Amino acid sequence: MPDWMTDIRARLAAARLDPAREGEIAEELAQHLDDRYAELRRDGATPDEAQARALDELKDHALMREQLAALERREHTLPPAGTPARDRLFAGLWQDVRFALRSLRLNPGFAALALTTLALGIAATTVIYAVVDTVRPAHGRTGGARRHGDTPVVCRRRPRREIVGVLPDVRIHCTGLT
Amino acid sequence: MRHISGSDRELKKGSAELLILSLVSARARHGYEIGKLIETKSNGVVKFSAAALYPLLYRLEKRGWIKGRWVEKEGQRRRRYYDITADGRRILREQRTAWQAFAAAINRIAGLNEA
């Protein structure tokens, strides 16, 4: 009887199952392939034919791996009954972080794109705030000195009418603030 | 006999739980036996490869509808046998009723009984 374990473990590897669980699944699949191989041999297949056709049973291994990974992940995410809510939250969070890191490692292209997008977003936001901060009139900032003729900026919808800032002598209607 | 594949996969997927629960309701069976019975009883129309069958079995086990246990026999590799649970029997009853109603409705609409 062929040794199926190497083939099976190669097909399961990317699912990153718990080693003990992976061992059990591999053992069960090996038993299945043994049965299939024996049946094919009884039906007259040569050893090579029987081995190749038995391995066909794992043809959809990508789907199998995906389903097994999802099943095991769900099991890890659900802590035992009676676990405090706070511990449940952090157990799930930790699982999510590990899953995210694993996914990024397995998809370097996507990881690079995601990091570039984040970097560009942060850079663009920083530039916009820096420009606004530079061009904003100094006396319009909170705490700036109020001069004669400046128009107080008052929020009408606040509980108390209060000055939230001052601008040069221009007409201002502050109606959208809460 | 035509083997179910491609666009019929959803139909097969939907019925898989019912098929497995039905087969293990009589007695405990191992994975290969379950797959073989599905193939022979359907005259080869429905087939599950190992890659498709075992994730299904594990899913049903996680739901508590079937329970697997390792059985060792001298001189043989140990086997995992699956047996139906009380919850599984309840689900099986519900699924049988639902499938009967569904099949009857399809028959009435498509006129399959007259064919």
Image (spheres, coloured by chain):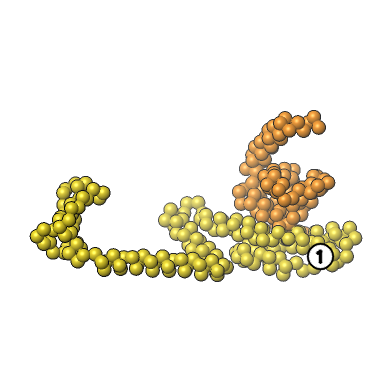
Chain colours: A yellow, B orange
- The chain carrying label 1 is A
Q: Identify whether A1 is placed above or below B70.
A: below
* Left or right relative to A157: residue A8: right
The mark total stands at: 1
Residue at screen point 21% across, 65% down: A137
Amino acid under disc 1: Gln
Quadrant containing the C terminus of chain B in the rendered view: top right
- Residue B82 appears anywhere in the view: yes
Residue at screen point 17% across, 64% down: A139
Quarter holding residue B76: bottom right
* Front residue (pair B77, A144): A144
Residue at screen point 71% across, 63% down: A27
Image spot of residue B13 (x, y percent): 68, 47
- Residue A102 appears anywhere in the view: no
Residue at screen point 46% across, 66% down: A117
Quarter holding residue B88: top right
The extreme left residue here reads: A148
Image spot of residue A78 (x, y percent): 52, 54
* Front residue (pair B16, A118): A118
The extreme front residue here reads: A170
The residue beneath circle 1 is A51
* Front residue (pair B57, A57): A57
Q: Identify whether B87 is placed above or below A112.
A: above
Tell me the crowding category of disc 1: few under 14, some 14 to 19, or many 20 or more residues within 10 angstroms, Cα based. many
Image spot of residue A98 (x, y percent): 51, 65
* Left or right relative to B57: residue A93: left
* Front residue (pair B32, B48): B48
